[in-house]
Image: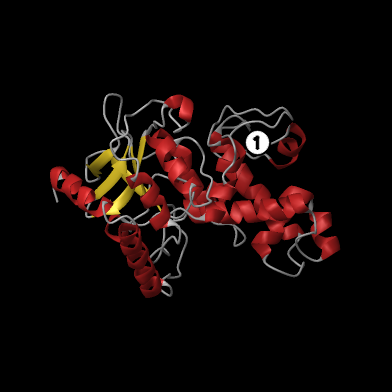
Amino acid sequence: MTVRKAWIWVTVVAGAGLSFVMVLVIGVYLVAGNLANGVGQGAVGLAKGAVPAAYQTLVQKWGNLCSAINPALLAAQLYQESGFNPHAKSPAAAQGIAQFIPGTWATHGIDGDGDGDRDVWDPNDAIPSAAKYDCSLAKYVKDAPGDPTKNMLAAYNAGAYAVIKYGGVPPYRETQNYVKTITTLEESFAAPVGRVQPSQQAAGAIYYAQKKLGTPYLWGGNGTPDQGGRFDCSGLTKAAYESVGITLPRVANDQYNAGPHPERDELLPGDLVFFSDDLTNSRTIRHVGIYVGGGYMIDAPRTGAVIRFDPIDTPDYFGATRVTEDGAKALPTSV
């Protein structure tokens, strides 16, 4: 379908109003019914580009250090802690890509690359040290009832003694939220081993976006009245999903982590589709749109253009995300 035909199509269906939405709803839910039991099981790999290429081999290797962790879980921790920034430093003096505090680093930091030093600022040391620390915590709480990985994460947040005392994840809201956050983010960093479940909110997000067709682009636009209701690319996708009760981060490269990543031939209407000049690093994503089917998306492309239909099969196509409510909630407010 050409872009011109797509415009003609939306003009016709726009007059149908709710019928357009119902077609989307019916289509999405029919697919949901067909795929509900289609998620497979298997070894955990990393989703395409989710971890910057400079760290992918390290995360894949050290994420398999013990049975309590996997590469996607380790990636989720690094993203949560620093956004893969090796120079990150917190107000609490946590340092580097894995955000070790000096006391913990002194005990658990290792010379991961064998160059004779232990440098908290060097990912070649810090990433192996993070995996080693996770596995050490898992050993401390190995006899506690419940899921070993969740117990390890709880020990990371609240200390091993609390996990042992309570016989599993302790009843601390902060700790329970941390465990849920990391295990949810894990789904975003893992390469799917089967079809990804459809989003129930997809039709509503598309309906919102299609009502904005023809609206002029505004860099930094959030669609507010003082901005004339205009959007940039990630402002549009954020508003579209906010209309169905899901709050996404403001920028495109963080929106990529709001759920699992379907393959190109598994895309469904409502998936977010992303574009980058570096196809090995999700942190370099520069554009996002909402997939509507037939190889097309609704997007706010650039200054001087309007919100419109555009093809997704371009050389800079990076990948897609099927937004989930839990996935969006798990994302850090700033990375």
Image point (83%, 63%), residue name: 166
Observer-nearest of 227 and 292: 227
Compared across the picture, whether 106 is left or right of 35 comes to right
Q: Position of residue 310 (x, y in %)?
A: 23, 42
Quarter holding residue 21: bottom left
Judge by depth and name the residue closer to the eye, 22 or 263: 22
Displayed quadrant of residue 34 = bottom left
Circle 1 packing at 10 Å, graded few (<14), some (14-19), many (20+), is: many
Q: Nearer the viewer, residue 33 or 230?
A: 230
Q: Which residue is at 32% across, 66% downward?
A: 27
Residue that protrudes farthest toward the front in the picture: 15
Left or right placement of residue 266 versus residue 172 in this view:
left
Count the numbered circles shown: 1
28 up-or-down from 237: above or below: below
Secondary structure beneath dot 1 equals loop
Picture quarter containing residue 209?
top left
Coloring scheme used: secondary structure
Name the quadrant of the C terminus.
Answer: top right
- Whether residue 7 is situated above or below residue 163 in the rendered picture: above
Q: Is 224 placed above or below 32 here?
A: above
**Looking at the image, which residue sits at the far right?**
165
Residue with the mark numbered 1: 99
Measuring from the top left, give residue 76's x and y in whole percent.
Answer: 55, 48
Q: For the residue marked with disc 1, what is the amino acid?
A: Gln
